[in-house]
Amino acid sequence: MLKIYHNPSCKKSRAGLQFIQQSGVVFEIVEYLKNSMTEKEMEKLLIKLNKKPTDLLRTQEDYFKQNLKGKNFEDHELIKIILQNPKLMQRPVVEGKYKAVIGDPVENIEPLLK
């Protein structure tokens, strides 16, 4: 079953959700701003994404600009920062059994629907 990490107030996240809904695939919605992940869950998600924590960062967020820009962090430190400030995470993220993708653009989600 697919899992979409979703922010209802984000246009791109809503587009990703609609894309999955139209596919008819069974999925679960995780509103990650309300229900935070554990460090282990984030580490597993990053493995499925085949990405580093820096790849998940939304650099246009004020928190990033004011507190993180120009600084270097270890991966485990960035994971903690993202979990404490979930708005920093790219969205939507769609997770399948073995793979995950950042669903922007929504066409990125397509391989998980097969």
Image: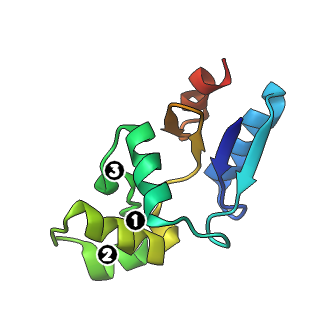
2 and 1 marks in contact (CB < 8 Å): yes
Residue beneath disc 2: 65
Tag 3, which secondary structure? helix
Gap between marks 3 and 1 measured at Cα = 13 Å
Badge 2 marks a residue whose secondary structure is helix
Identity of the residue drawn at 41% across and 77% down: 62
Instruction: Give the crowd class for mark 3: few <14, some 14-19, many >=20 residues within 10 Å.
Output: some
Q: Residue 66's spot in the image, x, y percent?
A: 31, 82
Question: Label 2 sits on what residue type?
Answer: Lys
At 46% from the left and 78% from the top, the residue drawn is 84
> Of residues 93 and 104, which is closer to you in this image?
93
- Specify few, some or many for label 1: CA neighbours under 10 Å numbering under 14, 14-19, or 20 or more: few
In front of the other: label 3 or label 1? 3
Q: Residue 55 carries which label?
A: 3
Q: Which of marks 3 and 1 is nearer the N terminus?
A: 3
Q: In which quarter of the image is the N terminus?
A: top right
Amino acid type at mark 3: Asp
Residue bearing the label numbered 1: 60
**Is 33 situated left or right of 84 in this image?**
right
Quadrant containing the C terminus in the rendered view: top right
Of marks 3 and 2, which one's residue comes earlier in the chain? 3
Residue 67 on image: x %, y %: 29, 81
Q: Residue furthest top?
A: 114
Q: How many marks?
A: 3
Marks 2/1: CA distance? 7 Å
Quarter of the image where one finds residue 79 = bottom left
Location of residue 56 with respect to 47 vertically, above or below = below
Residue drawn at x 58%, y 27% is 107
Q: In which quarter of the image is residue 18?
A: top right
Q: Residues within 10 Å of mark 2 (few under 14, many from 20)?
A: few
**Color encoding of the figure:** rainbow
